[in-house]
Amino acid sequence: MIPGYAGKYLEVNLTNGKIHETKFDDEVLRDYVGGRGLTAKILWDRLGHKWEKVDPLGPENLLLLLTGPLTGYFPGGRTCVSGKSPQSNGTVGSTLSSEFGVELRCAGYDGIIVTGQSEKPVYLFIKDSDVELRNAENVWGKNGKHTVAALTHECRDLLKARYPRFGEWKEPSILYVGPAGENKVRTAVVSAKWAHAAGYGGYGAVMGSKRLKAVVARGTGPLPEAADIKKVKRLINTVCINVYKNEMWRRWGTGSAGYEVGAKTSSEPVRNWQEEWHDEKSFGVDKFENRLWMKQYWGDFGCPTTCLKLSCVKDGKYKGAITDNPDYEMQAYLGPNLGIFTPEENVFLVSLLDDLGLCGIQTGNVMGFAAELYQRRVLTCNDLDGLELKWGATEAFAALAEKIAHREGIGDTLAEGTYRAALKIGKTKKKNLLPYAVQSKGISIGAHGTRSGKDYPEIISYACSVQGGDHTSTAGLPLDGGGSELMEIFNDSGVYCSFNSFGIPRNTRFEFYEAVTGIKLTRKEWVRTKALKILQLQRAMLLLGGPDLKWTPGTHDDNPPRFYEPLPSGPYKGKTTDKQGVEEYKKRYYKAVGWDRNGIPKTETLKSLGLEDVDKTLEKIR
Amino acid sequence: MKRKKEPIWIARELSKCSGCRKCEIACSLYHENRVWPTASRITVFMLVPGLEFPHFCAQCEDYPCVSSCPTNALSVSKQTGAVLVDNKACIACGKCIDACPGRIPHMHPKEKHIVICDLCNGNPQCVKACREGNWNVLKTVPRREMAYKLYARKPDETTRDLSTKIYGEIGEEYL
């Protein structure tokens, strides 16, 4: 057995209620590590042969909750959520921070594979090797904060009753879905705590479709034994010392960007990306800090950055709203993107979306899309069930979010996410609405534009990513560089927070991996073999797609049309993404990752990586 | 000349806790040579998100846990003032948990003995971890005549108090 792994995975069949343990060969774990890499392998092995036919929201899909060998060791542990994505019909390794991965590993499991579909709402309760499905009818329908409160009480009482001699039980960690997940909204998240979410991919809808309200874990053992704990201690120190010097992330988290990405790099979504610049100092991070933050540092297991902060609106119209800083993505998408520039209104919307279990990026994007259609008189007040969806109309956006989460009226269409909603509304209105849909392959784009050229994404970042618009997994060259998706795959497969890896020496993460697992791995080896293999699997499943949508690289390996319009304002007014440049970069990228000129992984590439079965399956789309 | 050790206390500013649990990691690495949160002598409770706080021995002036022990497994260190557990003498009866006003001691998750903060022989690792990152929730101070017992509170009670401070009446809904 490889050090650093618990060595066991839980397999839970919700159709028949059976739970058993499963294992993977050392060879598989060596190649795919854990988290995102292993989810790709599991999904391919089990569903690859019939991928196009698998309904992401049907019982055939899998919901994977995996950790990696570095979870809990590398500062800032996370959990990777995956399955067939109801957004892209491919796969996304969507990670969220919380104590869950650590609790699970301390309980003796590296991950959970959920199959089937339950008849009634259930939650999975794990206390070390005691694992059971429990009735979730009394929490079904509850919002995020109330779900956490109810399950914390119920499960702590359970622990007290079953293990009365232990002393006071610390609460277990909970992954859950809100009403949006229950209603299979494609922009629904899998949540933890109050403001933590795995958003990209839409796995809240997958979890909801299985009627799995939550997974509750409490592990009392140690983390699986590392190969060299002395070296691990030293490396934890190396990572932390580097982070402690970075006052920017520590003090403000990503929260400073709500103003700065607009004002400085001019790459923030403003009114559905019609602009990417604003200079509203009312939206400055100091306003959030001084008016709303109850904690200057708020974080999760082992995190030296503690970037979250804790916002609470204590009086006025939005009293009762509680969330994190909010982080930049939430500030942007539920702020300037909707024409909102007041911290309290932003915190209110973020808190509401947390509660509903909606992804702030995907839902902020689709609400911005709807508001632009209202601005352009494509959608009328009548189409919007009476809502006057003007820019900055916080209450109207809040009402719309409720409709989306409950799939009511226009919300039912918007619950399909921006791309599908654009097709659907476009059909009724007999208009091409894709120019207003800022997404790539069904996944709305993170709040970092490419037009000014001053932010980190490159012109093919989203166009060629196997995770569409995911700003945390962007494509770029060189393949072993900081802007490469292959390096992100390492973070998501080791399953820890990439923010704590910024600025550490190039090889520290691989040294860390070796200290925990005892397996020597070089950056070169990672990029040329293992990561590339994971990328091909994800690419293959993305291109196979289905059942409702399929992607053609010639058309869909591209930026949203809006990114080719010139910026209308700000210091980079007139700048745009170079279409010709994108085509040229794409060719170079395809070549580097071994795809043919149509963007399909080449036979020789797949064979050299030992993926002959993938090659065979891809014949049907060549 | 070697400085004479004097009893210490860990002063705590609970509402500043980030919930990072680096104290638990440091504690378990020191005592168990493993990352083992449940075996840690300090536990960060988060019964309500945002209301994280470390829960660990307050070294009450009258040490009710020590006098409750039927096997004399608990004693007070003259050097540091910490409660020391004789793991071999401990029968894991849990009487000290009931005697503690904050129900702070807990069982070791694998071995049959109680777990109580021993102040790391005068150099608490949790304090080091907390101060390195500048959270400064914990601070080592000389032990004086103070009602330290006040800091031995049950987790639910501390949570309620912190909720009042951090969320005000809004917090009532989630307690």
Image (tube, rainbow, N blue to C red):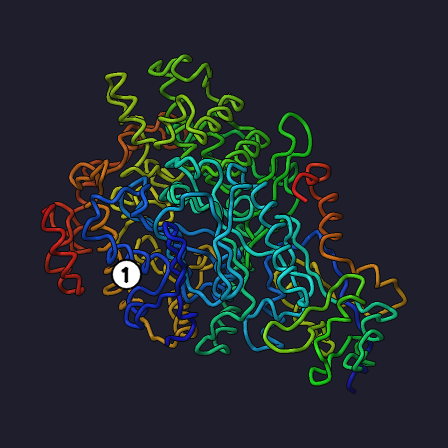
Q: Looking at the image, can residue A586 be seen?
A: yes
Q: Where is residue A30? Give x, y as percent.
A: 31, 70
* Quadrant that contains the N terminus of chain A: bottom left
Q: Amino acid at mark 1?
A: Ala
Viewer-nearest residue: A199 or B125: A199
At 48% from the left edge and 59% from the top edge, which residue is drawn? A101
Q: Residues within 10 Å of mark 1 (few under 14, many from 20)?
A: many
Displayed quadrant of residue A551: top left
Q: Is A601 rendered above or below residue B103?
A: above
Image: B64 above or below A438 = below
Q: Quadrant of residue B110?
A: bottom right
Residue that mark 1 sits on: A531
In percent of width and height, residue A8 lies at 40, 68
Q: Is residue A477 left or right of residue A387?
A: left
Query: Is residue A281 something one can see in this rendering?
Result: no
Which residue is outermost to the bottom?
A: B1
Q: Secondary structure at mark 1?
A: helix
How many numbered markers are drawn? 1
Up/down of B101 relative to A123, above or below: below
Q: Position of residue A341 (x, y in %)?
A: 53, 28
Residue B30 vs residue A562: left or right? Answer: right
Q: Residue at x 15, y 39 (%)?
A: A554
Looking at the image, which residue sits at the far right? B145
Chain ID of residue with mark 1: A
- A269 or B120, nearer to the observer: B120
Q: Is residue A256 left or right of residue A295?
A: left
User: Where is residue B128 shown, x and y percent of the image?
Assistant: 66, 68
